[in-house]
C-alpha cells in the first residue's frame, strides 16, 4: 500500500427533510449567496425548502450556473460576491452548481492575478484562502458534495480544467434523495455512470496490495449495477434513490484513493470531448472508458480480470477472452441505461476528435496513466478507436 493522507471535513446531513437543519449549519452575521443553476431547484422542492429555512438570514440569490459551469458566469458571480460583501456561498443544485461555488469561493479571494490560473496550476499553487461554502446537492454523480475538486469550462478556448484544494471542501452537504425524484432519465443514467467510472479510475490500475480498498470499490460498483436499472424504472423509490446517492458520494470522497494507484485518463480525455463537443460529462466517460481499458489491456490485465470475476462473475480460463468479456459487459451495462458508447452515436468524427486532442496534448506535453504511458499519440489512438 502507498503512503497516504486522508482528510475529509465535510459534515454530511443525509435523509428526508434535512434542509430543515440548514439554520444550525449556516453562519449567522454574514451575508449569504444562494447559488443555483437553470431552475430545476424550483421544481424539485429544494428551492422552497431552502427559502423557508433561510428566514432571518441575510441572503441574496444568484442563478444561471450552467451544466459544465463556465468561467465567465463564475466571474460575474465573483463580482457580485465582492460588491455585495458575501461571506458564505450556499450552492443548491447538481455538481455544476457546487463546482461553480467552489471556484467562485476561491476566485473571490484570489489576489495573485487572473483566477483562471487557479485551474492551470493544480498542485503547484495552493490557494491562500477561499470563502466558506456549503451545499444542498440534488444530483448523485460527481461526489462534489464530499470532495474539494471543481471543474470549470472556458468556451472561447475549448478548455475544461480541474482544480482541487482543501480550502474549498464544503463545510456541510445536505443530501435529501427526495430531490432526485424529478431527475430526467438521462441525468439519472449519467449519475450512475459517472459514479461507476470514478470508482474504476481508482481501482483498475495495478495491485499494490490494498484488499480493503478493492472490496470497497467492488461494493460500490455492485450496488450501482444492482440498483441502477431499478431506479431508472422506479424513479420515486426512496431507498433506491438514497442508495444511489450514497454510492456517488462515497465514490469520490477520498476514501477509495487511499494508498492505491489511480488513473484519471478517462476523465481527462472526457473533459476534452465535453469542451469541444459539449457532450454530457458522463456520456464522454461511457465512450472513453472501454477504449482506455482495451488500449491498456496488458498493463491493467490483472485488475480487469479481478473486476470481471468479482463484478460480472467471469471465470473464463482464456484470459484474453475474460478481459474482452469484462469490457463488453461494462459497455452492455451502459447501453442498458440507454447511454451510447461510440462517438459516431453523437455524429462526431473520431479522427477529427483524435487529431484535435493529440495537438492539445502535444502543446501541453500532457502525460497520463498509472504508467505515464498515455502521451499525445496514445491519446490519439484511444480517441480514434472510439
Ligand atoms: O441547471 P439546473 O436547472 O439546476 O438543471 C440541472 C442540469 O440541467 C439538472 N438537475 C440537477 N438536479 C436536478 C436536475 N433536474 C431535475 N431534478 C434534479 N434534482 O441536471 C442537469 C445537469 O446538472 P449538472 O450539475 O451539470 O450535473 P452533474 O451533477 O453531473 O455535474 C456535472 C459537472 O460536474 C463535473 C463535470 O465535469 C461537470 O462539469 N464533475 C465534477 C467533479 C468534482 N467536483 O469532483 C468530478 C466529476 O468527475 C465531474 O468532472
Ligand atoms: Zn466524473
Image (cartoon, grey):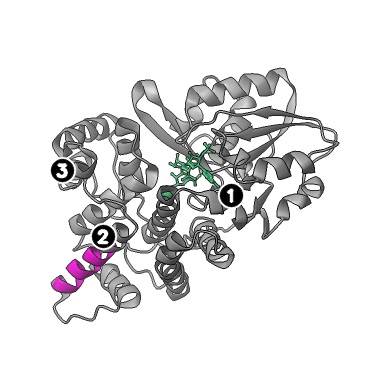
Foreground tag (3 vs 2): 2
In three-dimensional space, the C-alpha distance between marks 3 and 2, rounded to whole angstroms, equals 17 Å
Residue at horizontal 26 percent and vertical 49 percent from the top: 287
Q: Which residue is mark 3?
A: 384
> Does 330 lie within the magenta span?
yes
Between 311 and 106, the residue placed more toward the observer is 311
Marks 3/2 in contact by CB < 8 Å: the verdict is: no
Q: Which residue is mark 1?
A: 145
> Does 20 lie within the magenta span?
no
Of the image marks 3 and 1, the number of the one nearer the N terminus = 1
In three-dimensional space, the C-alpha distance between marks 3 and 1, rounded to whole angstroms, equals 34 Å
Of the image marks 1 and 2, the number of the one nearer the N terminus = 1
Between 145 and 279, the residue placed more toward the observer is 279
Of the 4 image quadrants, the one containing the N terminus is bottom left
Q: Position of residue 350 (x, y in %)?
A: 17, 39
Q: Residues within 10 Å of mark 2 (few under 14, many from 20)?
A: some
Q: Residues within 10 Å of mark 3 (few under 14, many from 20)?
A: some
Indicate left or right for 140 with 338 as reference. right
Q: Which residue is mark 2?
A: 331
The secondary structure that most of the magenta stretch takes on is helix
Q: Position of residue 223 (x, y in %)?
A: 45, 69
Identify the magenta region.
321-331
Indicate left or right for 314 with 172 as reference. left
Amino acid at each position: 500500500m502507498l503512503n497516504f493522507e486522508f482528510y475529509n471535513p465535510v459534515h454530511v446531513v443525509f435523509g428526508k427533510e434535512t434542509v430543515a437543519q440548514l439554520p444550525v449549519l449556516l453562519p449567522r452575521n454574514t451575508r449569504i449567496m444562494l447559488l443555483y443553476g437553470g431552475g430545476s431547484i424550483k421544481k424539485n422542492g429544494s428551492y422552497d425548502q431552502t427559502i423557508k429555512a433561510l428566514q432571518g438570514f441575510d441572503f441574496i440569490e444568484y442563478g444561471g450556473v450552467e451544466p459544465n459551469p463556465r468561467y465567465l458566469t463564475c466571474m460575474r458571480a465573483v463580482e457580485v460576491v465582492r460588491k455585495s460583501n458575501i461571506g458564505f456561498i450556499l450552492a443548491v443544485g447538481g455538481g455544476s452548481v457546487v463546482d461553480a461555488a467552489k471556484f467562485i469561493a476561491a476566485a473571490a479571494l484570489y489576489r495573485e492575478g487572473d483566477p483562471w490560473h487557479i485551474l492551470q496550476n493544480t498542485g503547484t499553487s495552493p490557494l491562500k484562502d477561499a470563502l466558506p461554502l456549503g451545499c444542498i446537492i440534488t444530483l448523485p454523480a460527481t461526489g462534489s458534495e464530499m470532495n474539494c475538486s471543481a471543474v470549470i469550462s472556458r468556451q472561447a478556448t475549448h478548455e475544461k480544467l480541474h482544480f482541487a484544494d482543501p480550502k474549498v471542501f464544503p463545510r456541510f452537504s445536505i443530501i435529501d434523495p427526495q430531490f432526485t425524484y424529478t431527475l430526467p432519465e438521462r441525468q439519472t443514467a449519467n449519475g450512475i455512470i459517472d459514479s461507476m467510472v470514478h470508482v474504476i479510475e481508482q481501482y483498475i490500475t495495478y495491485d499494490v496490495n490494498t484488499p480493503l480498498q478493492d472490496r470497497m470499490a467492488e461494493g460500490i460498483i455492485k450496488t450501482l449495477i444492482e440498483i441502477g436499472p431499478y431506479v431508472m424504472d422506479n424513479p420515486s423509490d426512496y431507498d433506491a434513490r438514497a442508495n444511489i446517492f450514497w454510492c456517488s458520494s462515497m465514490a469520490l470522497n477520498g476514501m477509495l484513493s487511499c494508498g492505491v494507484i489511480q488513473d484519471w485518463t478517462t476523465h481527462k480525455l472526457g473533459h476534452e470531448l465535453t469542451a469541444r463537443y459539449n457532450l454530457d460529462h458522463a456520456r464522454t466517460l461511457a465512450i472513453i472508458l472501454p477504449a482506455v481499458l482495451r488500449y491498456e489491456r496488458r498493463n491493467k490485465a490483472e485488475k480487469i480480470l479481478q473486476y470481471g470475476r468479482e463484478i460480472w462473475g467471469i471465470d473464463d480460463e482464456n484470459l484474453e477472452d475474460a478481459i474482452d468479456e469484462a469490457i463488453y459487459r461494462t459497455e452492455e451495462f451502459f447501453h442498458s441505461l440507454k447511454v451510447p458508447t461510440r462517438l459516431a452515436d453523437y455524429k462526431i468524427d473520431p479522427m477529427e476528435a483524435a487529431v484535435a486532442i493529440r495537438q492539445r496534448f502535444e502543446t501541453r506535453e500532457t502525460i497520463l496513466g498509472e504508467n505515464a504511458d498515455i502521451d499525445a499519440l496514445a491519446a490519439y489512438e484511444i480517441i480514434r478507436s472510439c
